[in-house]
Image (cartoon, helix red, strand yellow):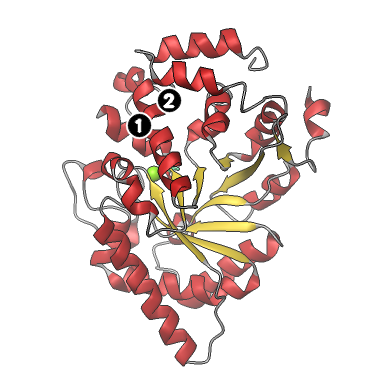
Amino acid sequence: EQNEWGALKDEQTVSTDGRHFKVVANVGTLAEIVDARQNGAEGIGLVRSEFLYARDEHFPSEDGQTKAYKQFLTEMPGQRVVIRTLDIGGDKKLGSLNLPQENNPFLGFRAIRIGLARPEVLRPQLRALLRSSVYGQLAIMFPMIATIEEFRQARQILDEERQRLIEQGVSVADDIEVGMMLEIPSSAVMADAFAREVDFFSIGSNDLIQYLFAADRGNSQVAYLYQELHPAVLRLVKQVIDAAHAEGKWVSMCGEMAGNPLATPLLMAMGLDEFSMNSSNILHIRSLINQLNTRQLQPLVHKAINAATASEVEQMIRQEVPQVR
Ligand code: PEP
Ligand code: MG
């Protein structure tokens, strides 16, 4: 089985009816890029940039960040690398920022909320990303966007920094895609409006499911509510994909659900363009996609979103898609 998948390392990801997908990697450090390449990643769908800040108590300099982002890009020549701006708060702590204690950190001051409130954090990171952009195919992604205004503000800051760099004679790529994590239910509901303004969405199923079921993603007492195959999740995911495609935008998923083989038939039939996951899952998911037919799976999608429970959905998938082992 390992060998069967190994042969897929340099293959494309394409369904039996000829639809192309991308299976890409989530990485948290530069070292993980090696794993991604060894497992045949067709790009990087999520760089969690927090690692740069977590390394020590000091805040990374703009130059230090530029160097790191440049390395990610040069390690993946010709392939897209999506780098997410700082996503701290909630489960991700950071000593050097001195953030206040909160009663509900997951519902509090985190991610882009910090970035917008503390421009001295966001601006150097965006400058570093822009400066690195000439070394590869960079996409920039903002985390935890809840409203259109937040996205506009973040994009505005990015445009200002780009302008500033250009005036200083620094070269900046002119084809950087700018997108957002789709991981808050309000944004999923408003996906059609967001789709007019972004270049892409990346569905953060980890947070999206947590907020949808009001169940802390790290609390085992409520883990039974964390249901990737629940029709409520599937309906939202489908709505997001349809909204993006209606505006000609692409959609990735970078939460754990993207690497769950039970979800693969549904996600590919819904037209998810990119599956971003831990490198160890890449070849399995590619092998599955390469055995399935998106057209034949359409009735299953219809049945799944009209089911009442996650276990009904799981049963249908196991019954109708024997390739999912
Ligand atoms: C997610 O929320 O699904 C996600 C990919 O981001 P993180 O796990 O880093 O919060
Ligand atoms: Mg998240």
Residue on which the image places disc 2: 228
| Camera sees residue 215 | no
- Judge from the rendering whether residue 91 lies leftward or rightward of residue 26; answer left or right: left
Quadrant position of ligand 1: top left
**Circle 2 sits in a helix, a strand or a loop, which is it?**
loop
Label 1 beta carbon within 8 A of ligand 1:
no
- Judge from the rendering whether residue 162 lies leftward or rightward of residue 269; answer left or right: left
Q: Is residue 12 above or below residue 116?
A: above
Q: Is residue 276 above or below residue 180?
A: above
Q: Quadrant of the C terminus?
A: top right
| Camera sees residue 197 | yes
Residue on which the image places disc 1: 209
Residue placed furthest toward the left = 103
Amino acid type at mark 2: Glu
Q: Quadrant of the N terminus?
A: top right
* Residue at 45%, 40% in the rendered image: 241
Mark 1 crowd level (few <14, some 14–19, many ≥20, 10 Å Cα): many
Amino acid type at mark 1: Ile
- Judge from the rendering whether residue 72 lies leftward or rightward of residue 193; answer left or right: right
Q: Nearer the viewer, residue 54 or 298?
A: 298
Q: Are marks 2 and 1 in contact (CB under 8 Å)?
A: yes
Q: Position of residue 218 (x, y in %)?
A: 35, 31
Q: Position of residue 99 (x, y in %)?
A: 24, 57
Quadrant position of residue 260: top right
Q: Is residue 197 above or below residue 289?
A: below
Mark 2 crowd level (few <14, some 14–19, many ≥20, 10 Å Cα): many
* Residue at 72%, 41% in the rendered image: 39
Quadrant position of residue 38: top right
Q: Position of residue 63 (x, y in %)?
A: 51, 77
* Residue at 31%, 52% in the rendered image: 193
**Circle 1 sits in a helix, a strand or a loop, which is it?**
helix
